[in-house]
Image (cartoon, grey):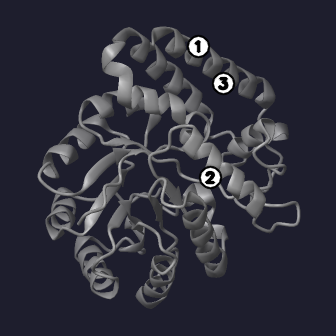
């Protein structure tokens, strides 16, 4: 294993046109925005990308485009296996692997889609390991949809000892679990990267190798500063960690369409259409634009404080 996949890893959005096609011009702008704002890697074809609502052809095209646009500046990892059957998952993952991604991410709930238990999980995992290219770094993702399936310590230890895994996107949302997993994988190539904003700063201080939560779609640069410079400015880091946790509380208000409205404001792309969220989030969540105003105001305040601290 030679790949290093860690740091600030945005879970990428998929821009769509009003006609419900992937907006590749907008996607190009989005990739550039992530990189300009501190991304260390890009996670394409994830839940935030609406992968469950993309055809296999679209998932493959999305991954291939992001790889080409990133052009080696940062690693690109991708998932995209959403089916239940083993054969279909092998087809999906093999197709994504052929796009040139730097890492192929396996969704943990797909190893046991009917919740039958650890033996089924391990049997399915071994089957996929045998079927996938042995030289391609792999990742693990405790994706919350259609259900969150956390890995046991034994399952994680197996993956760490295999030498084939570069990253776990940890969705435990529990600091003690993150700490235990960091210790468990200490001497392996498997990095634990937390995805929960509420514990992001504490997880980083406890050895999480970065952050890969949904609000990397709003302010990856602020998470990057927390990862790289917080030790030199602890009081500012504490204040920032509180802001980041509170801002992320907006996630239930129509994400990922919420993040698309934000990027519509920035001019990254023109359309906030989402296949996952098919309702008017402004109608359902009152004062949503005022909330986005406050999130952006907070960004400006902390960016100014960070600039002044340098």
Tell me, yes or no, whether the two marked residues, 1 and 3, touch with CB atoms within 8 Å. no
Question: Which residue carries the number 1 mark?
Answer: 304
Determine the secondary structure under disc 2.
helix
User: Judging from the image, what secondary structure is the residue with disc 1 in?
Assistant: helix
| Marks 2/3: CA–CA distance | 22 Å
Name the spot of residue 123 as percent of width and height, x first.
25, 81
**Residue at (46% x, 34% y) in the render:** 197
Q: Which of the 4 image quarters holds residue 118? A: bottom left
Please say whether residue 79 is visible from this viewpoint.
Answer: yes
In the visual, does 2 lie left or right of 103? left
Q: Is residue 203 above or below residue 16?
A: above
Mark closest to the chain's N terminus, 1 or 3: 3
Q: Residue at x 75, y 23 (%)?
A: 293
**Closer to us: 271 or 228:** 228
- Would residue 45 be found to the left or right of residue 28 on screen? left
In percent of the image, x 29 and y 85: which residue is there?
A: 127
The reply to whether the C-beta atoms of the residues labelled 2 and 3 are less than 8 Å apart is no
* Quarter of the figure with the C terminus: top left
Residue 129 position within the rendered picture, expressed as x and y whole percent measured from the top left: 28, 80
Nearer the camera: disc 2 or disc 3: 2
For mark 3, what is the residue? 295
Q: What numbered label is drawn on residue 31?
A: 2
The percent coordinates of residue 150 (x first, y second) are 33, 56
């Amino acid at each position: 294993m030679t790949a290093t996949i860690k740091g600030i890893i945005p879970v990428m959005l998929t821009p769509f046109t009003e006609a419900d096609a992937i907006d590749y011009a907008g996607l190009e702008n989005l990739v550039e925005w992530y990189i300009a704002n501190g991304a260390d890697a890009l996670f394409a074809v994830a839940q935030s990308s609406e992968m469950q609502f993309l055809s296999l052809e679209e998932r493959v095209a999305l991954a291939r485009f992001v790889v080409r646009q990133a052009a080696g500046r940062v690693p690109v990892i991708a998932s995209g296996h959403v089916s239940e059957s083993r054969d279909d998952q092998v087809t999906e993952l093999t197709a994504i692997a052929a796009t040139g991604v730097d890492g192929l991410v396996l969704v943990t709930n797909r190893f046991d889609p009917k919740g039958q238990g650890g033996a089924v999980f391990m049997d399915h995992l071994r089957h996929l390991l045998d079927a996938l290219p042995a030289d391609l770094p792999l990742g693990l993702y405790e994706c919350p949809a259609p259900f969150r399936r956390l890995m046991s310590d034994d399952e994680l230890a197996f993956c760490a000892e295999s030498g084939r895994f570069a990253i776990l996107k940890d969705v435990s949302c529990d600091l003690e679990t993150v700490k235990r997993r960091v210790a468990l994988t200490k001497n392996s190539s498997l990095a634990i990267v937390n995805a929960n904003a509420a514990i992001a700063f504490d997880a980083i201080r406890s050895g999480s190798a970065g952050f890969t939560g949904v609000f990397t779609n709003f302010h990856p640069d602020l998470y990057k500063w927390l990862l790289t410079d917080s030790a030199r400015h602890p009081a500012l880091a504490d204040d920032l960690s509180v802001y980041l946790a509170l801002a992320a509380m907006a996630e239930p208000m129509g994400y990922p369409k919420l993040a698309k409205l934000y990027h519509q404001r920035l001019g990254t792309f023109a359309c906030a259409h989402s296949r996952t969220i098919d309702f008017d989030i402004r109608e359902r969540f009152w004062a949503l634009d005022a909330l986005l105003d406050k999130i952006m105001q907070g960004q400006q305040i902390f960016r100014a404080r960070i600039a002044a601290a340098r």
